[in-house]
Image (spheres, rainbow, N blue to C red):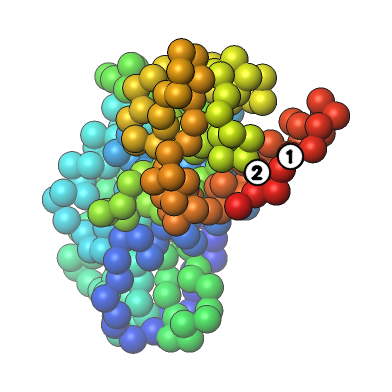
């Protein structure tokens, strides 16, 4: 992960949330060619370059909890960074960066072979926060002691079609690969009416379509007869309310699949 130049600090002290740090870090990593996914198996942000897995853990301020999370991620990742906000020279982690305590924090992070990412916020709310990589993880990466957990993270990253979560959020459902697959099935049923799992898979839904419909984890589907499923009205409403953006992506994918078969999709709605 390349370093970025330090930004001018001109913002007043503000109360930042963890989720405020996520969009600029996600954009920064994506611009460098990483496959970025947020809220993956407990990791705030994951970034994949080939088979190299980077994890970024975010906090509003430096804490023991942050170190515990970051060192735990070292058991599955090739490099781990902690991310903190900077609100200008007079704000948190601005002028403090040159204090004895802050120098001690940096020494501790380096001793633990962790990297540090700083997100600079500005007085103008329209200004894009600047991402600075203060330093990278040093030394030889610690041995991966949780290979099964690492593989689960990699499978989850591969199973998601995009990054639709914001790292550091709480109180709202994470859009996992499984939930994405269920949304796609719901979109197909919503546009085309009752269908069989086989017909759904022909449109590009998951190989686990039968299992998703049968378990009906989100209570979106109903079984009309043996092997035929429909979208419940509550499911339709939740998709429209909560996953409208993703539904539009899958609607376009559905149109392409039908066009390839020489069919026209009925209008959405």
Residue drawn 24% across the image and 37% down it: 71
Q: List the single residue furthest toward the front.
A: 225
Q: Nearer the viewer, mark 2 or mark 1?
A: 1
Residue drawn 54% across the image and 60% down it: 4
Residue drawn 74% across the image and 39% down it: 265
Q: Nearer the viewer, residue 107 or 165?
A: 165
Residue drawn 53% across the image and 79% down it: 127
Residue 148 as seen in the image, left or right of residue 212:
left
Quadrant of the rendered image containing residue 19: bottom left
Q: List the single residue furthest toward the right.
A: 262
* Residue 91: image location, x then y, percent: 29, 80
Query: Pointer 1: residues within 10 angstroms few (<14), some, or many (20+)?
Result: some
Disc number at residue 81?
none
Relative to 190, is 149 above or below?
above
Mark 2 vs mark 1, CA separation in Å: 9 Å
Quadrant of the rendered image containing residue 49: top right
* Residue 167: image location, x then y, percent: 38, 52
What SS does tag 2 mark?
helix
The answer to whether any part of residue 58 appears in the image is: no
Relative to 91, is 158 above or below?
above
Compare marks 2 and 1 and give the one earlier in the sequence.
2
Residue at which label 1 appears: 265
Q: Nearer the viewer, residue 119 or 22?
A: 22
* Residue 226: image location, x then y, percent: 46, 13
The answer to whether any part of residue 178 appears in the image is: yes
Q: List the single residue furthest toward the left.
A: 64
Residue at which label 2 appears: 251
Quadrant of the rendered image containing residue 150: top left
Q: Nearer the viewer, residue 251 or 143?
A: 251
What SS does tag 1 mark?
loop
The answer to the question of whether label 2 and label 1 lie on touching residues, with beta carbons closer than 8 A, is yes
Residue 108 as seen in the image, left or right of residue 257:
left
């Amino acid at each position: 992960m390349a370093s970025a130049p330090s930004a001018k600090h001109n913002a007043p002290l503000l109360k930042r949330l963890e989720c405020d740090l996520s969009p600029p870090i996600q954009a920064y990593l994506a611009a460098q060619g990483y496959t970025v996914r947020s809220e993956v198996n407990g990791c705030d942000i994951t970034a994949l370059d080939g088979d190299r897995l980077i994890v970024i853990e975010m906090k509003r301020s430096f804490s023991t909890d942050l170190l515990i999370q970051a060192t735990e991620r070292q058991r599955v990742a090739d490099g781990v960074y902690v991310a903190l906000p900077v609100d200008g020279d007079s704000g948190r982690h601005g002028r403090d960066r040159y204090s004895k305590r802050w120098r001690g924090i940096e020494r501790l992070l380096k001793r633990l072979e962790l990297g540090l990412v700083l997100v600079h916020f500005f007085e103008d709310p329209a200004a894009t926060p600047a991402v600075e990589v203060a330093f990278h993880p040093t030394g030889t990466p610690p041995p991966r002691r949780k290979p099964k957990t690492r593989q689960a993270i990699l499978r989850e990253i591969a199973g998601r079609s995009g990054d639709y979560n914001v790292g550091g959020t709480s109180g709202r459902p994470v859009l996992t690969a499984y939930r994405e697959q269920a949304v796609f099935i719901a979109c197909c049923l919503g546009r085309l009416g009752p269908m069989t799992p086989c017909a759904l898979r022909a449109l590009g839904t998951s190989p686990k379509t039968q299992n998703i419909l049968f378990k009906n984890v989100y209570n979106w589907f109903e079984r009309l007869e043996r092997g035929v499923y429909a979208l419940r009205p509550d499911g339709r409403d939740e998709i429209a309310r909560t996953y409208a953006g993703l539904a539009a992506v899958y609607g376009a994918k559905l149109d392409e699949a039908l066009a390839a078969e020489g069919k026209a999709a009925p209008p959405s709605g």
